[in-house]
Protein backbone atom coordinates (compact mmCIF):
# COMPACT_ATOMS: atom_id res chain seq x y z
CA UNK A 1 0.00 0.00 0.00
CA UNK A 2 1.30 3.49 -0.84
CA UNK A 3 2.44 5.56 2.12
CA UNK A 4 0.35 8.66 2.78
CA UNK A 5 1.95 11.49 4.72
CA UNK A 6 -0.20 14.47 5.69
CA UNK A 7 1.58 17.54 7.03
CA UNK A 8 -0.92 19.15 9.40
CA UNK A 9 1.16 22.32 9.70
CA UNK A 10 1.33 22.84 5.94
CA UNK A 11 -0.31 25.74 4.09
CA UNK A 12 -1.61 23.16 1.61
CA UNK A 13 -5.06 21.85 2.67
CA UNK A 14 -4.98 18.28 3.94
CA UNK A 15 -7.59 17.26 1.37
CA UNK A 16 -5.37 18.58 -1.46
CA UNK A 17 -2.37 16.68 -0.08
CA UNK A 18 -4.36 13.43 0.04
CA UNK A 19 -5.96 14.00 -3.39
CA UNK A 20 -2.57 14.50 -5.05
CA UNK A 21 -0.99 11.55 -3.26
CA UNK A 22 -3.80 9.18 -4.26
CA UNK A 23 -3.77 10.53 -7.83
CA UNK A 24 -0.01 9.96 -7.97
CA UNK A 25 -0.47 6.39 -6.66
CA UNK A 26 -3.02 5.74 -9.44
CA UNK A 27 -0.96 7.40 -12.19
CA UNK A 28 2.18 5.47 -11.15
CA UNK A 29 0.12 2.23 -10.93
CA UNK A 30 0.74 1.65 -7.24
CA UNK A 31 -3.06 1.42 -7.33
CA UNK A 32 -3.62 -0.43 -10.65
CA UNK A 33 -6.88 -0.40 -12.67
CA UNK A 34 -9.61 -2.31 -10.89
CA UNK A 35 -7.95 -1.95 -7.48
CA UNK A 36 -10.26 -1.24 -4.55
CA UNK A 37 -9.15 1.83 -2.61
CA UNK A 38 -9.06 1.72 1.21
CA UNK A 39 -12.36 2.46 2.92
CA UNK A 40 -12.83 5.88 4.48
CA UNK A 41 -12.45 4.23 7.90
CA UNK A 42 -9.15 2.57 6.92
CA UNK A 43 -7.77 5.74 5.36
CA UNK A 44 -8.83 7.77 8.40
CA UNK A 45 -6.82 5.44 10.61
CA UNK A 46 -3.79 5.70 8.30
CA UNK A 47 -3.81 9.46 7.77
CA UNK A 48 -5.51 10.79 10.90
CA UNK A 49 -7.98 12.74 8.74
CA UNK A 50 -11.73 12.87 9.37
CA UNK A 51 -13.79 10.44 7.30
CA UNK A 52 -15.78 13.36 5.86
CA UNK A 53 -12.54 14.80 4.46
CA UNK A 54 -11.65 11.46 2.89
CA UNK A 55 -15.16 11.12 1.42
CA UNK A 56 -14.73 14.58 -0.12
CA UNK A 57 -11.41 13.51 -1.69
CA UNK A 58 -12.99 10.34 -3.10
CA UNK A 59 -15.81 12.41 -4.64
CA UNK A 60 -13.20 14.68 -6.23
CA UNK A 61 -11.40 11.65 -7.66
CA UNK A 62 -14.70 10.33 -9.01
CA UNK A 63 -15.49 13.72 -10.57
CA UNK A 64 -12.03 13.67 -12.16
CA UNK A 65 -12.92 10.35 -13.80
CA UNK A 66 -10.15 8.26 -12.23
CA UNK A 67 -12.26 6.14 -9.83
CA UNK A 68 -15.73 4.61 -9.77
CA UNK A 69 -17.89 4.35 -6.66
CA UNK A 70 -19.81 1.08 -6.50
CA UNK A 71 -22.68 1.15 -4.01
CA UNK A 72 -22.16 -1.30 -1.20
CA UNK A 73 -18.78 -2.38 -2.55
CA UNK A 74 -16.29 0.49 -2.44
CA UNK A 75 -14.20 2.83 -4.55
CA UNK A 76 -12.34 1.29 -7.49
CA UNK A 77 -9.67 2.62 -9.88
CA UNK A 78 -11.19 2.94 -13.33
CA UNK A 79 -9.93 0.52 -15.97
CA UNK A 80 -9.43 2.56 -19.16
CA UNK A 81 -7.39 -0.01 -21.02
CA UNK A 82 -8.73 -3.15 -22.56
CA UNK A 83 -5.92 -5.38 -23.76
CA UNK A 84 -7.26 -6.60 -27.09
CA UNK A 85 -5.92 -9.75 -28.73
CA UNK A 86 -6.55 -10.39 -32.40
CA UNK A 87 -8.66 -13.41 -33.22
CA UNK A 88 -6.25 -15.98 -34.60
CA UNK A 89 -6.61 -19.14 -36.67
CA UNK A 90 -6.70 -22.49 -34.90
CA UNK A 91 -2.97 -23.40 -35.17
CA UNK A 92 -1.99 -20.15 -33.48
CA UNK A 93 -4.65 -20.54 -30.84
CA UNK A 94 -3.18 -23.93 -30.00
CA UNK A 95 0.22 -22.33 -29.59
CA UNK A 96 -1.21 -19.70 -27.21
CA UNK A 97 -3.53 -21.51 -24.79
CA UNK A 98 -3.94 -18.53 -22.41
CA UNK A 99 -5.07 -16.29 -25.28
CA UNK A 100 -7.32 -19.09 -26.53
CA UNK A 101 -9.06 -19.31 -23.14
CA UNK A 102 -9.55 -15.54 -23.08
CA UNK A 103 -11.13 -15.57 -26.54
CA UNK A 104 -13.36 -18.49 -25.58
CA UNK A 105 -14.59 -16.62 -22.50
CA UNK A 106 -15.41 -13.53 -24.55
CA UNK A 107 -17.17 -15.53 -27.26
CA UNK A 108 -19.19 -17.42 -24.62
CA UNK A 109 -20.24 -14.14 -23.02
CA UNK A 110 -21.38 -12.67 -26.36
CA UNK A 111 -23.38 -15.82 -27.11
CA UNK A 112 -25.07 -15.55 -23.71
CA UNK A 113 -26.07 -12.01 -24.61
CA UNK A 114 -27.83 -13.28 -27.72
CA UNK A 115 -25.19 -12.70 -30.42
CA UNK A 116 -24.85 -15.30 -33.16
CA UNK A 117 -21.46 -16.80 -34.02
CA UNK A 118 -21.48 -14.88 -37.29
CA UNK A 119 -22.18 -11.57 -35.52
CA UNK A 120 -19.55 -12.36 -32.87
CA UNK A 121 -16.97 -12.91 -35.61
CA UNK A 122 -17.89 -9.60 -37.26
CA UNK A 123 -17.67 -7.79 -33.92
CA UNK A 124 -14.16 -9.14 -33.28
CA UNK A 125 -13.00 -8.28 -36.78
CA UNK A 126 -14.59 -4.82 -36.66
CA UNK A 127 -12.83 -4.05 -33.38
CA UNK A 128 -9.47 -5.22 -34.72
CA UNK A 129 -9.93 -3.31 -37.97
CA UNK A 130 -10.83 -0.16 -36.04
CA UNK A 131 -7.75 -0.47 -33.83
CA UNK A 132 -5.50 -0.96 -36.83
CA UNK A 133 -6.96 2.11 -38.55
CA UNK A 134 -6.56 4.15 -35.35
CA UNK A 135 -2.93 3.09 -35.15
CA UNK A 136 -2.19 4.86 -38.43
CA UNK A 137 -2.23 8.22 -36.62
CA UNK A 138 -0.95 8.50 -33.06
CA UNK A 139 -1.48 11.71 -31.11
CA UNK A 140 -0.10 12.65 -27.70
CA UNK A 141 -2.12 15.24 -25.82
CA UNK A 142 -1.81 17.30 -22.65
CA UNK A 143 -3.38 20.60 -21.54
CA UNK A 144 -1.66 23.75 -22.83
CA UNK A 145 -0.67 24.77 -19.32
CA UNK A 146 1.36 21.55 -19.02
CA UNK A 147 2.27 20.84 -22.63
CA UNK A 148 5.80 20.11 -21.39
CA UNK A 149 4.46 16.87 -19.90
CA UNK A 150 3.29 15.95 -23.39
CA UNK A 151 6.75 16.82 -24.72
CA UNK A 152 8.33 14.38 -22.25
CA UNK A 153 5.91 11.65 -23.33
CA UNK A 154 6.61 12.47 -26.99
CA UNK A 155 10.39 12.23 -26.64
CA UNK A 156 10.23 8.94 -24.76
CA UNK A 157 7.64 7.28 -27.01
CA UNK A 158 9.35 8.33 -30.24
CA UNK A 159 12.49 6.50 -29.08
CA UNK A 160 10.54 3.44 -27.92
CA UNK A 161 8.05 3.10 -30.80
CA UNK A 162 10.01 4.54 -33.74
CA UNK A 163 6.86 5.78 -35.49
CA UNK A 164 5.56 9.28 -36.32
CA UNK A 165 3.78 10.82 -33.33
CA UNK A 166 2.18 14.25 -33.12
CA UNK A 167 1.87 16.37 -29.97
CA UNK A 168 -1.46 18.20 -29.75
CA UNK A 169 -2.62 20.59 -27.00
CA UNK A 170 -5.76 19.27 -25.32
CA UNK A 171 -7.61 22.46 -26.29
CA UNK A 172 -6.96 21.73 -29.99
CA UNK A 173 -7.56 17.96 -29.88
CA UNK A 174 -11.17 18.10 -31.06
CA UNK A 175 -10.25 20.22 -34.07
CA UNK A 176 -7.42 17.86 -35.05
CA UNK A 177 -9.66 14.79 -34.68
CA UNK A 178 -12.22 16.42 -36.96
CA UNK A 179 -9.63 16.23 -39.75
CA UNK A 180 -9.18 12.46 -39.57
CA UNK A 181 -11.42 9.39 -39.66
CA UNK A 182 -9.64 7.53 -36.86
CA UNK A 183 -6.75 8.12 -34.47
CA UNK A 184 -5.18 6.83 -31.30
CA UNK A 185 -4.85 9.42 -28.56
CA UNK A 186 -2.21 8.78 -25.90
CA UNK A 187 -2.07 10.70 -22.63
CA UNK A 188 -1.16 10.38 -18.96
CA UNK A 189 -3.77 9.08 -16.54
CA UNK A 190 -3.70 12.58 -15.03
CA UNK A 191 -5.45 13.86 -18.18
CA UNK A 192 -7.45 10.78 -19.22
CA UNK A 193 -10.89 12.12 -18.28
CA UNK A 194 -10.47 15.27 -20.37
CA UNK A 195 -9.08 13.34 -23.35
CA UNK A 196 -11.90 10.78 -23.33
CA UNK A 197 -14.56 13.49 -23.21
CA UNK A 198 -13.11 15.02 -26.39
CA UNK A 199 -12.12 11.86 -28.27
CA UNK A 200 -15.14 9.60 -27.67
CA UNK A 201 -17.56 11.61 -29.88
CA UNK A 202 -14.89 11.64 -32.62
CA UNK A 203 -14.62 7.81 -32.76
CA UNK A 204 -11.00 7.95 -31.64
CA UNK A 205 -9.63 5.57 -29.05
CA UNK A 206 -7.75 6.81 -26.00
CA UNK A 207 -4.92 4.89 -24.33
CA UNK A 208 -3.61 6.12 -20.97
CA UNK A 209 -0.01 5.58 -19.97
CA UNK A 210 1.31 5.20 -16.46
CA UNK A 211 4.10 7.39 -15.20
CA UNK A 212 7.14 6.15 -13.33
CA UNK A 213 6.48 5.89 -9.57
CA UNK A 214 9.81 7.53 -8.59
CA UNK A 215 10.15 5.06 -5.69
CA UNK A 216 13.95 5.23 -5.75
CA UNK A 217 13.98 9.03 -5.77
CA UNK A 218 11.39 9.29 -2.99
CA UNK A 219 13.45 6.94 -0.84
CA UNK A 220 16.42 9.24 -1.37
CA UNK A 221 14.31 12.24 -0.30
CA UNK A 222 13.28 10.42 2.88
CA UNK A 223 16.94 9.80 3.73
CA UNK A 224 18.19 13.36 3.16
CA UNK A 225 19.57 15.04 6.30
CA UNK A 226 17.57 17.76 7.98
CA UNK A 227 18.28 21.18 6.49
CA UNK A 228 19.32 19.74 3.12
CA UNK A 229 18.81 21.97 0.07
CA UNK A 230 16.96 20.00 -2.64
CA UNK A 231 16.18 21.21 -6.16
CA UNK A 232 13.52 19.79 -8.51
CA UNK A 233 13.93 20.54 -12.23
CA UNK A 234 11.61 19.40 -15.02
CA UNK A 235 10.27 20.39 -18.41
CA UNK A 236 6.81 20.22 -16.83
CA UNK A 237 5.67 22.83 -14.31
CA UNK A 238 2.78 20.52 -13.36
CA UNK A 239 5.23 17.73 -12.53
CA UNK A 240 7.20 20.12 -10.33
CA UNK A 241 4.01 21.13 -8.53
CA UNK A 242 2.90 17.55 -7.80
CA UNK A 243 6.44 16.52 -6.80
CA UNK A 244 6.70 19.50 -4.44
CA UNK A 245 3.42 18.59 -2.71
CA UNK A 246 4.49 14.96 -2.25
CA UNK A 247 7.98 15.86 -1.02
CA UNK A 248 6.56 18.49 1.33
CA UNK A 249 4.16 15.85 2.67
CA UNK A 250 7.12 13.54 3.30
CA UNK A 251 9.50 16.02 4.88
CA UNK A 252 7.57 19.16 5.74
CA UNK A 253 9.98 21.97 6.67
CA UNK A 254 12.86 19.55 7.35
CA UNK A 255 14.49 20.34 4.02
CA UNK A 256 14.62 23.42 1.80
CA UNK A 257 12.85 22.60 -1.47
CA UNK A 258 13.20 24.62 -4.66
CA UNK A 259 11.64 23.94 -8.05
CA UNK A 260 12.25 25.27 -11.54
CA UNK A 261 11.27 24.55 -15.11
CA UNK A 262 14.17 24.32 -17.54
CA UNK A 263 12.75 27.32 -19.39
CA UNK A 264 13.04 29.56 -16.30
CA UNK A 265 16.71 30.57 -16.48
CA UNK A 266 16.56 32.75 -13.35
CA UNK A 267 15.12 30.03 -11.07
CA UNK A 268 17.32 27.35 -12.61
CA UNK A 269 20.43 29.45 -11.88
CA UNK A 270 19.23 29.98 -8.29
CA UNK A 271 18.86 26.22 -7.83
CA UNK A 272 22.31 25.56 -9.30
CA UNK A 273 23.88 28.00 -6.84
CA UNK A 274 21.96 26.90 -3.72
CA UNK A 275 20.91 23.25 -3.99
CA UNK A 276 23.08 20.43 -2.67
CA UNK A 277 21.11 17.83 -4.64
CA UNK A 278 19.09 18.24 -7.84
CA UNK A 279 16.53 15.68 -9.04
CA UNK A 280 15.54 16.13 -12.68
CA UNK A 281 13.84 14.24 -15.49
CA UNK A 282 15.88 12.89 -18.37
CA UNK A 283 15.08 15.74 -20.85
CA UNK A 284 16.21 18.28 -18.22
CA UNK A 285 19.51 16.55 -17.51
CA UNK A 286 21.49 18.27 -20.28
CA UNK A 287 20.15 21.79 -19.49
CA UNK A 288 20.98 21.29 -15.80
CA UNK A 289 24.52 20.16 -16.60
CA UNK A 290 24.94 23.12 -18.96
CA UNK A 291 23.75 25.55 -16.26
CA UNK A 292 26.22 24.08 -13.76
CA UNK A 293 29.04 24.38 -16.29
CA UNK A 294 28.15 28.02 -16.97
CA UNK A 295 28.22 28.84 -13.25
CA UNK A 296 31.16 26.65 -12.23
CA UNK A 297 33.52 29.57 -11.52
CA UNK A 298 31.09 30.81 -8.85
CA UNK A 299 30.35 27.45 -7.26
CA UNK A 300 32.22 26.22 -4.20
CA UNK A 301 30.80 22.75 -4.75
CA UNK A 302 28.62 21.65 -7.67
CA UNK A 303 25.29 20.06 -6.70
CA UNK A 304 24.79 16.32 -7.07
CA UNK A 305 22.51 15.54 -10.04
CA UNK A 306 20.07 12.64 -9.96
CA UNK A 307 18.42 12.15 -13.37
CA UNK A 308 15.33 9.94 -13.51
CA UNK A 309 15.82 7.30 -16.18
CA UNK A 310 12.29 7.43 -17.56
CA UNK A 311 8.94 9.18 -17.31
CA UNK A 312 6.77 6.30 -18.56
CA UNK A 313 6.79 2.82 -17.04
CA UNK A 314 8.01 0.08 -19.36
CA UNK A 315 4.78 -1.93 -18.93
CA UNK A 316 2.79 0.95 -20.45
CA UNK A 317 5.17 1.15 -23.39
CA UNK A 318 4.88 -2.59 -23.95
CA UNK A 319 1.08 -2.45 -23.87
CA UNK A 320 1.07 0.53 -26.22
CA UNK A 321 3.22 -1.42 -28.68
CA UNK A 322 0.73 -4.28 -28.64
CA UNK A 323 -2.24 -1.92 -28.98
CA UNK A 324 -0.61 -0.29 -32.01
CA UNK A 325 0.29 -3.62 -33.61
CA UNK A 326 4.03 -3.03 -33.27
CA UNK A 327 4.64 -6.40 -31.59
Image (tube, rainbow, N blue to C red):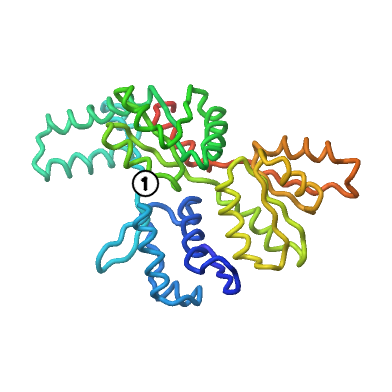
Residue 242 location, quadrant: bottom right
Percent coordinates x, y for residue 282 in the rendering = 65, 39
Please tell me how crowded label 1 is: few (under 14), some (14-19), or many (20+) other residues with Cα within 10 Å.
Answer: some
Q: How many marks?
A: 1
Q: Give the position of the C terminus as an image quadrant.
A: top left
Question: Could you tell whether 86 is left or right of 2 in the image?
Answer: left
Residue at horizontal 58%, vertical 53%? Answer: 241
Residue at horizontal 84%, vertical 40%? Answer: 295
Which of 95/187 is in front?
Answer: 187
Question: Could you tell whether 86 is left or right of 274 in the image?
Answer: left
Residue 106 location, quadrant: top left
48 versus 118 height, above or below: below
Q: Which residue is mark 1?
A: 193
Percent coordinates x, y for residue 67 in the rendering = 36, 56
Which of 268/209 is in front?
Answer: 268
Question: Could you tell whether 30 is left or right of 291 in the image?
Answer: left
Residue at horizontal 27%, vertical 31%? Answer: 203
Percent coordinates x, y for residue 44 in the rendering = 45, 75
Residue 250 location, quadrant: bottom right
Percent coordinates x, y for residue 137 in the rendering = 39, 24
56 versus 156 height, above or below: below
Which of 173/211 is in front?
Answer: 173
- Mark 1 secondary-structure assignment: helix
Amino acid sequence: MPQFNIQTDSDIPASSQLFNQILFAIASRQYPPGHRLPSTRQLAMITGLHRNTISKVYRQLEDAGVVDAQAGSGIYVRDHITEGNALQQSPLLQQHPAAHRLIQQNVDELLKQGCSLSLTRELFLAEIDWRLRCSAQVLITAPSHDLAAGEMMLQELQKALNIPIQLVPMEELGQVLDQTRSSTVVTSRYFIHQAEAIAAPKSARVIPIDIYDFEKELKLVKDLPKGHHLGIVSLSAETIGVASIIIHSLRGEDILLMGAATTDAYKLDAIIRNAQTIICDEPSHIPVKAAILAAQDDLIRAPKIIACESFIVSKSIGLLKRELGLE
